[in-house]
Image: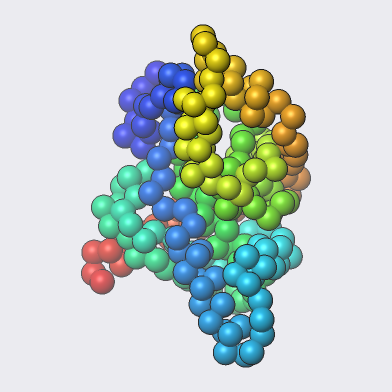
């Protein structure tokens, strides 16, 4: 087993060792674009909540081309250790002949949000030989069913599970830890508490991307890696 600066060695709250791909950037850039679209809807007089707008735009992304049609987004607002950047400049790029429409634009945003994660996962799977059986999606990225989980499956090449609480994010996890400290029985471990009292009857869905979705993400990621040279130049010169 090698040492990789892109990976952090951490433990779960229960004390289990974990190799973590610690990405500094995920959906902050995506959120900024949705805020821009929110302003457009308000100017036009349309009444749509931000939650509805997120759902609508996420679902629109599914209509995009498998490789995002020649559109590219680099979502780095801050530095990114996985790709050796100490600072970030959010960038949106397109080729002259790209299919520049909303579906491809949104899909590029979503694929960008998980591209750095994919780069780190490749170190675990291709360099260290780790076999991933499935992933569990949690957070706002997975709130719209069948979108974020599908794209993560396309990126990782494995099934992605989401629970009905998937959209709750980090504060939900902290609340669970607090509940455990208050409600645990004598000798009851955190793992047992979660398995038997929290997640025992929770509804879970699983999705596996089709081969064309996986190959499409591979093509997008290759362009993403090439575009990092543009990102590094932007950080250096602007």
Of 20 and 11, the residue lying toward us: 11
The picture places residue 12, in percent across and down from the top left corner, at: 45, 25
Identified at 67% across, 29% down, the residue is: 199
Drawn side of residue 7 relative to residue 107, left or right = left
Where residue 90 sits, quadrant-wise, is bottom left
Seen at 71% across and 63% down, the residue is 59
Q: Nearer the viewer, residue 66 or 39?
A: 39
Question: What's the residue at 61%, 83% (across, down)?
Answer: 41
Q: Is residue 74 above or below residue 204?
A: below
Q: Residue furthest top?
A: 187
Tell whether 196 sits left or right of 39: right
* Viewer-nearest residue: 154 or 211: 154
Is residue 57 visible in the rendered structure shown here? no
- Is residue 102 shown above or below 227? below
In the image: residue 168, left or right of residue 214: left
The residue depicted at 57 percent of the width and 53 percent of the height is: 140
Compared to 204, does 63 lie above or below?
below
Question: Can the viewer see residue 212?
Answer: yes
* Residue 84 placement (x, y as % from top left): 31, 47
- Above or below: residue 173 compared with residue 58: above
Q: Quadrant of the C terminus?
A: bottom left
Residue 221 % position (x, y): 53, 52
């Amino acid at each position: 087993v090698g040492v990789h600066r892109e990976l952090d060695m951490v433990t779960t709250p229960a004390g289990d060792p974990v190799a973590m791909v610690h990405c500094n950037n995920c959906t902050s850039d995506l959120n900024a674009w949705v805020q821009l679209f929110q302003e457009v809807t308000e100017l036009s007089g349309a009444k749509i909540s931000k939650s509805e707008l997120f759902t609508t735009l996420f679902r629109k992304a599914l209509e995009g081309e498998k490789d995002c049609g020649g559109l590219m987004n680099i979502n780095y607002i801050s530095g990114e250790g996985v790709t050796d950047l100490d600072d970030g400049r959010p960038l949106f790029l397109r080729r002259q002949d790209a299919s520049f429409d909303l579906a491809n634009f949104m899909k590029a945003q979503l694929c960008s949000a998980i591209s750095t994660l994919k780069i780190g996962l490749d170190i675990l799977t291709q360099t260290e030989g780790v076999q991933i059986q499935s992933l569990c999606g949690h957070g706002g990225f997975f709130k719209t069913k069948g979108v974020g989980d599908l794209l993560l499956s396309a990126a990782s090449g494995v099934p992605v599970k989401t629970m009905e609480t998937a959209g709750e994010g980090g504060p939900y996890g902290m609340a669970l830890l607090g509940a455990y400290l208050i409600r645990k029985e004598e000798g009851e471990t955190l793992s047992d508490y979660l398995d038997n009292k929290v997640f025992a009857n929770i509804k879970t869905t699983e999705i596996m991307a089709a081969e064309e979705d996986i190959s499409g993400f591979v093509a997008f990621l290759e362009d993403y890696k090439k575009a990092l040279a543009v990102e590094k130049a932007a950080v250096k010169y602007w």
